[in-house]
Image (cartoon, grey):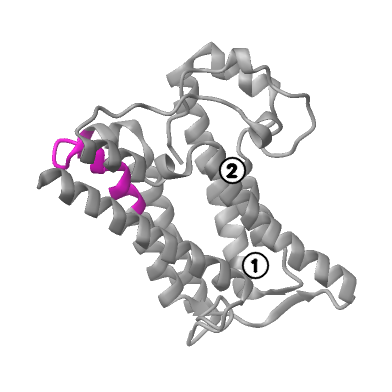
Amino acid sequence: MKRAIIFAYGLIAYAAFFVSILWAMGFVGNYFGLRSIDSGQPAPSAVAAILVNSLLLGAFAISHTVMARKGFKSWIVNYIPPAAERSTFVLVASLLLLLTFWQWQAMPATVWKVDHPIAAGLLQVSYWFGWFMVFFSSFLINHFDLFGLRQVTFALRGQAYQPVRFRTTILYKFVRHPLLLGFLIAFWSAPVMSEGRLLFALLTTAYIFVGIQFEERDLATEHGEVYRRYQRSVPMLIPHKGIVDEAALAPRRPHTV
C-alpha cells in the first residue's frame, strides 16, 4: 500500500507538471486562449504589477533553488520517503508556476513590435523551437527521472533506485545547459514584446543565470575534475567549441536546477 501511495503521488506531481508546462507555453506566448501574460488580472498601477509579478516569480525561484540543493534533499527525506523527494520538488514548483499564471498582473503596453511578416513568423518559429529544445533536452537526460516518475516506479517495484548515468548526448555535446537555453529562446522570441512579457523574460533570465551557478557548483563538487574538464570543453549556453569526449563522462548527472 505504501508503494502504491508513493507511485500515485508521483503521478499527481507529474500531472501537475504537465498542466503547468502546457499552460506556460500558452501563457508566455499568448496562445491557446488561456489566461496569458498579457490578458491576466489587471493591476491598479504599473508599480503594483511589477511588485506582485516579481514576488510571484521570486517565490518560485527561491523555492526551486532551495529544494534543488543537496542539503535540503538530505533534510526532507527525514520526513518523506526518498522515492518521493523528486516528485515533491516537481509538485511544489508546478503549483507555484500555476499560482504565478493565475495571479499574474497584466502589463499589456507594447515595448516593441516586429511588423515584417517574415521576421515575425521566424520569431514565432523560434518560440516553439525553444520549447522543443526544453522537452528534447529533458529526454536526453531522462525525462521521467527528471520529473520524478522513474523514482516512484522503482519504489512501486520494491527496487533500489538506480541513478541516471552522467552522459552528454546530442545537444549536451555542444552546450552544458540546452534545456535552459531552450527556455531563454522561448522567453525572448516575441514578435510583440509587452511590458509584462519583458519583465517576465528579464526576471526568468536573471534566475536562470543565478541557478546555473548553483548547479555548476554542485556538479563540480559531485564529479570533481571530470566535470571541470567538461566545463572547459563545452560552453555553458552558446555553442562555440568542439564536442566533448564521451570517455570523460561522470557516472551520472544529478538533478539540481
| Residue at image coords 61%, 53% | 183
Location of residue 30 by image quarter:
bottom right
| Residue at image coords 29%, 29% | 161
Can the viewer see residue 140 in this picture?
yes
Q: Which mark is residue 198?
A: 1
Give the residue type at disc 2. Ser
Query: SS for tag 2?
Result: helix
Query: SS for tag 1?
Result: helix
Location of residue 52 by image quarter:
bottom left
Which mark is first along the chain, 2 or 1?
A: 2
Magenta-tinted stretch: 75-90
| Image x and y of residue 229, in percent | 62, 15
The residue singled out by tag 2 in the image is: 137
Given residues 13 and 217, the one toward you in this image is: 13
Magenta-colored segment: predominant secondary structure: helix
- Dot 1 crowding, Cα within 10 Å, few <14, some 14–19, many 20+: some
| Image x and y of residue 61, in percent | 43, 53
- For the residues bearing labels 1 and 2, Cβ distance under 8 angstroms: no
User: Most extreme residue toward the front, as rendered?
Assistant: 157
Q: Is residue 183 left or right of residue 160?
A: right
Given residues 163 and 67, the one toward you in this image is: 163
